Image (cartoon, helix red, strand yellow):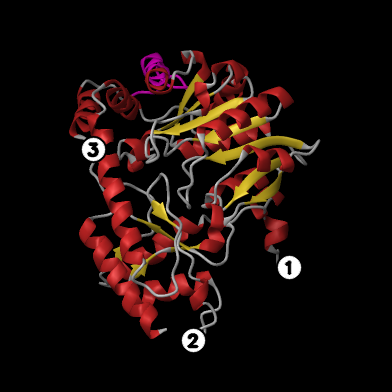
Amino acid sequence: MTTTAAELFSDRIGRIEISATMAVTAEAAKLRAQGAKLVDFGAGEPHFSTPQHIKDAAIAAIQSNFTRYTVVSGIPELRQAIVERHAADFGSSYTPDEAIFSTGGKLALFNAIQALVDHGDEVILPVPYWVSFKDIVQYAGGKVVYLETSEAENFRITADAIEAAITPKTKAIILNSPSNPSGAVVSPADLERIVRMAHERGIWLLLDECYVYLQYTGALVSGGSFTEAKDHLVVLGSLTKTYAMTGWRAGFALAPKPVITAMTKLQSQSTSSTAAFVQKAAVAALRSSQDCVAEMRADFLKLRNKILTRLKEIPGVTCTKPEGAFYVYPNISAYLGRNGVGSAMELSKRLLHEAHVVTVPGEAFGTDQHIRLSYATSHADVDEGVDRMKAWFAKL
């Protein structure tokens, strides 16, 4: 008797899909193994090396045998460093027992959603969205309520739009500012209104600030800055993008103590604590000079300007101007329908195999007329990659 997949696996695993960005990475890895010379605009990670003082702290921890289990939520020194860094940069007022350190920002997000969202709960999610948001909500049994944004308005999310999407079943709102994939930034005025609105209505605001230090619009602002309205706010942060530590898996959350307690309980039954030496490296990152952050941000800004200028050379391709993060989200609809290219997914696949340029199709982010390019790469690769795209599109 043959067992079907539906009979074999749990219902919840059927509610999610493989991460599109991870799938692209895997496909690119196969081509590299075959000798292909790729220009990689796919991976969402800084091209910089982890700063030396952070690596030194990890090495020192290992050499001093700081390699055992720690408390699940992170060593006290690290949680203190997290809240102190956040307070210094954003004027927040969290205590160490309102912080948890996790194996990457994605796990912090996963744990928060599993702790707060139940079956049938509605979660407002602006489009375009980071690939994992909808799947994690659906895994928890929640219902995703998609909030469309306007490309003509730079995919900007406003408080008015959020308010209009709220229903009696709304349990949570997910915001990602700066946004992956569009680079859109919620204005300080709208962010404050959204934080206060969620607080007043008893709705959880899950604020993914993974790219908060990569804003190009002026003063840095966090939802945690509005301290008197933080009772329904979960700030999700990451050291991976800020300090070029993607492979270290270093993320955190700041939230009311009961939420942190619930997230800690879940983490205790899954990953437990993060690697001990990574925690010491994180302390060094947070407490040492932040000059490396400013230097990386300055280069990302140059890369953004370069890729926007170069993309204008491709007829028919248009692109909004990202205000943060390190992605551009060009509209390639002018080329859909040409020579068998019926979707952004097909276009992205052919760019990979025919031009050897790695991109991520817009379907992964909830739109079907875009591709995402990460410009977290060298200036030479930006030029080479756009040159290849320009030549490929010209033949389509």
Residue 83 image point, x, y percent: 43, 18
Q: Residues within 10 Å of mark 1 (few under 14, many from 20)?
A: few
Q: Residue at x 25, y 22 (%)?
A: 288
Residue 83 falls inside the magenta stretch? yes
Q: Which residue is mark 1?
A: 1
Residue 20 image point, x, y percent: 50, 58
Residue 3 image point, x, y percent: 70, 64
SS class, disc 2: loop
Q: Does the rendering let one see residue 140? A: no
SS class, disc 1: loop
> Which of the pair 332/61 is nearer the observer?
332
Residue 377 image point, x, y percent: 28, 54
Q: Residues within 10 Å of mark 2 (few under 14, many from 20)?
A: few
Quadrant for residue 111, please give it: top right
* Residue 301 position (above or below residue 35): above
Contact flag, marks 3 and 1 (Cβ < 8 Å): no
Q: Which residue is mark 3?
A: 295
Q: CA distance from mark 1 to mark 2?
A: 45 Å
Q: Does the rendering let one see residue 39? A: yes
Asked if residue 162 lies left or right of residue 82, the reply is: right
**Segment tinted magenta in the rendering:** 68-84
Under mark 2, the amino acid is Asn
Q: Earlier in the sequence, mark 1 or mark 2?
A: 1
Q: Residues within 10 Å of mark 3 (few under 14, many from 20)?
A: few
Q: Which residue is mark 2?
A: 339
